[in-house]
């Protein structure tokens, strides 16, 4: 099938979900090369918009995402990667999921998860929140 | 907190997840107005890129998404809406989830879900896949 990379300048949003627990872990973007690398290597690879290069998740931290199943949506413009997440968490702030804050009606954000690891140890002081 | 709408021309990707089953149902985009409407009304509202207007999910089909919890990610540039999905499915092609196809390594797509309703009855013949 043809995946539609035309709507966001060559990028697709890619949702990452834990295959065993169902938890949504993060959202990244893939270009065609990242999607191909993900399918070929079995490790989820994104295109980093800030670094402007392919980014194999876990290349620095070791917290790789082993692909279990890749889904594509009805319009072929979004991806769902069901994965086994290696390590204690995917978030550079030390949480299992990047979606660790609840957004309240008044716009405030409340942390609703426990920290799973010390991000400074994994990513270095530069990434300390 | 400040949600970052600056990376995609005023839009954020918003993942919709069934709050009781954990199933990822769809991905849409929100602008600031859609996010505000979602929080204020308790029904998930997107910005439709094709129609260039706010789009309250279910406004035509009745298959609305009742907000249970809104999460924001570490970079404040992606949203996760945990919902109660009213009706048999969210997808205009008649499936419970828009992510009803598996993408194979060779690029082929395999339907891996059962159709939940007849889209022609809900959306009219124009939407028949």
Image: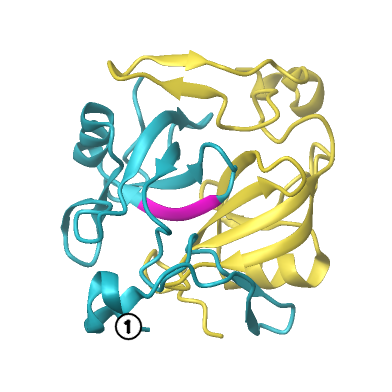
Chain colours: A cyan, B yellow
Instruction: Compare residues A33 and A110 and report the one nearer the observer.
Output: A110
Residue named by callout 1? A128
Residue A7 picture location, percent across and down: 37, 45
Residue A127 seen in this snapshot: yes
Q: Chain of mark 1?
A: A
Magenta-drawn stretch contains A26 = yes
Can residue B54 be seen here? The reply is no
Secondary structure under tag 1 reads loop
Q: Identify the image quadrant of residue B80.
A: bottom right
**Where does residue B12 sit, x and y in percent of width and height?**
49, 63
Residue depicted at 51% across the width and 32% down the height: A73
Q: Is residue A83 above or below residue A52?
A: above
Q: Quadrant of the C terminus of chain A?
A: bottom left
Quarter of image, res B91: top right
Query: Looking at the image, is B70 positioned above or below residue A33?
Result: below
Q: Residue B128: where, in percent of width, then height? A: 65, 18
**Mark 1: few, some, or many residues within 10 Å (few <14, many ≥20)?**
some
Quarter containing the N terminus of chain A: top left
Residue B96 percent across, percent down from the top left: 70, 29
Residue at the location (56% across, 17% down)?
Answer: B112
- Answer with left or right where residue A128 lies relative to residue A88: left
In which quadrant of the rendered view does residue A83 lie?
A: top left
Residue B115 counted in the magenta span: no
Residue at 16% in and 60% down: A52
State whether residue B71 is above or below residue B99: below
Magenta stretch secondary structure, dominant: strand
Q: In the displayed structure, does residue A116 sit left or right of residue A55?
A: right
Range of magenta residues: A24-28
Residue in view at x 32 percent, y 41 percent: A6
Left or right: where B96 falls relative to B77: right
Tally of marks: 1
């Amino acid at each position: 099938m043809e995946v539609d990379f035309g709507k966001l300048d060559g990028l697709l949003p890619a949702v990452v979900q834990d295959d065993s627990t169902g938890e949504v872990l993060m959202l990244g973007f893939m270009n065609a090369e990242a999607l191909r690398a993900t399918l070929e290597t079995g490790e989820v690879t994104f295109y980093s918009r800030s670094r402007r290069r392919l980014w194999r998740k876990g290349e620095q931290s070791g917290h790789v995402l082993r692909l279990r199943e890749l889904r594509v949506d009805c319009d072929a413009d979004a991806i769902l990667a069901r994965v086994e997440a290696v390590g204690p968490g995917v978030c550079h702030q030390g949480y299992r999921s990047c979606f660790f804050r609840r957004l309240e009606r008044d716009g405030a954000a409340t942390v609703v998860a426990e920290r799973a690891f010390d991000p400074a140890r994994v990513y270095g002081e530069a990434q300390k929140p």
